[in-house]
Image: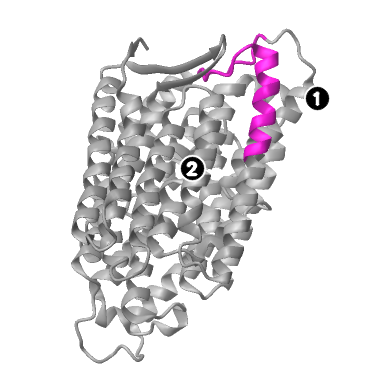
Amino acid sequence: MPSINSSLPLWSVLLPVIGAVIISRIPEKAVKARNATALISVSATFLVVVAILLHLLKNQLVEFTLVRFMPGLELFFRIDPLGILFGVTASILWIFAIVYSTGYMAKQPNQRRFFLCFVISMSATLGVAFAGNLFTMYIFFEYLTLATYPLVIHSQTDEATRSGIKYIAYCFGGGGLILFSLIILQGIVGHVNFAPGGILGATGGEPRFLLTLIFFMVVLGFGTKGAIMPFHSWLPAAMVAPAPVSSLLHAVAVVKSGIFGMTRVLYFIYGPDMLIELNVVNYLAIMVVFTILVGSILALRHTVFKMRLAYSTISQLGYITLGALMLTPVGLFGGILHIMNHAMLKITLFFCAGAVIKVTGKTDVREMRGIGKRMPITMIAFAVGGLGLIGVLPISGYLSKFYLLTGALDADRLVFVAVMLISSLLNSMYYLPIVVNAFFREGEFDKPKDLEAPLTMLVPILLLAIICVALGLFAHKTTMPLAENVVNYVFY
């Protein structure tokens, strides 16, 4: 694909920073001005991402070099089909998250700090999405950790402090592995720019042991933020954060950045041919299979609403990596689809959980019998999200699982098929009881009373549920072309 030079990538990471600076100057009590600034900032950034998307739809890659330190080492943006897919998904959901946050955070302390960090985290996420090399991705990867840390410890309780320490330790530990790996790769290849098929095909016969060691270091570096087991414990601990932050961490920004980084390494640093030659895929697949199954089992065991969703996220992220590890067009297609579908479905679930907690104060799923009669819109949306992740037609999640299963069969990976089917069964076991109890069991919520969340929370929930269904019905005109562009760019 031909490339054009444009400053649009720079503006996509600068606009949220400008918005955050303005928010920092707005008095704490000027709620409407602050909320409007946050919304305008992320909306303007989304428009920039759309402008970039239009170039990609014309088969033009967008490039921009910010700083060149030395030949082969530069802060460099290069937006390809994979980057724009992640960027579009993140920027759309950030708008919903900002609107939802204005309702959820109402009357809570330290709102200015919350919105400042919430907006600036978008800058870091888009920097990860649009990075043209491993060095740039590492810089924004660490930037994302720093930007989201104040959100994790927002409540400033002892539990939040402990969770924040764990979060920062895990994320910086993973970042250290990435930094060490990119230094070695820079020495081997002379640059760390992303390229379809990988950059290690002509390294002059470097020792297999060294390339294998680098592979596991860099993959586990990204995998730590992607919550691959056993490097996942920071994620459930981070549930102490407010619900909008939980949705940001689990559906849009942090964990998706980790999985996105792993995908970049697999296909744009090493490449399928080198991975097959090194015979490393099976070892990573064992970790991913373990993550999918154990994450599902732990989700089933937990009754705290947000914790159940947290462990579900850990399991679902494994699906994306599993699709990438198949090293086939169909497998990658399913995994890429799941990046978008899981983001939409999981943010819907976390928004619903936050609405229930905000309105009722209930945090345990065993306390929610009959709540569907009091909060019908919220719980219908929750049912949509849960059924989508189980893989029920016509909600978008069924497409991801269909192509992942097809890819596993094409790759003759019957173990992957079994793992996904077992995981889907476990999904149904921890999502369906919540829905059944909400609508078909008697409990303390039986008395008729309008108890839905404020409109600033309810409208994003309802719209996202509708979008999840629409993306299942009209995937051939929405998500599937974006995923197909990624596959074509990687393989053909």
Disc number placed over residue 349 in the picture, else none: none
Image quarter in which the C terminus is found: top left
- The number of callouts visible is 2
190 within the magenta span = yes
Contact between marks 2 and 1 (CB within 8 A): the answer is no
Q: Image quadrant of residue 213?
A: top right
Relative to 454, 63 lies left or right? right
Q: Secondary structure at mark 1?
A: helix
What amino acid is found at the position of numbered circle 1 in the picture? Phe
Q: Residue at x 65, y 52 (%)?
A: 229
Relative to 320, 351 lies left or right? left
Please state which of residues 451 and 237 is positioned toward the viewer in this rendering.
Answer: 237
Q: Which residue is mark 2?
A: 144
Relative to 401, 69 lies left or right? right
Which range of residues does the magenta coloring cover? 175-202
169 within the magenta span = no
Disc number placed over residue 209 in the picture, else none: 1
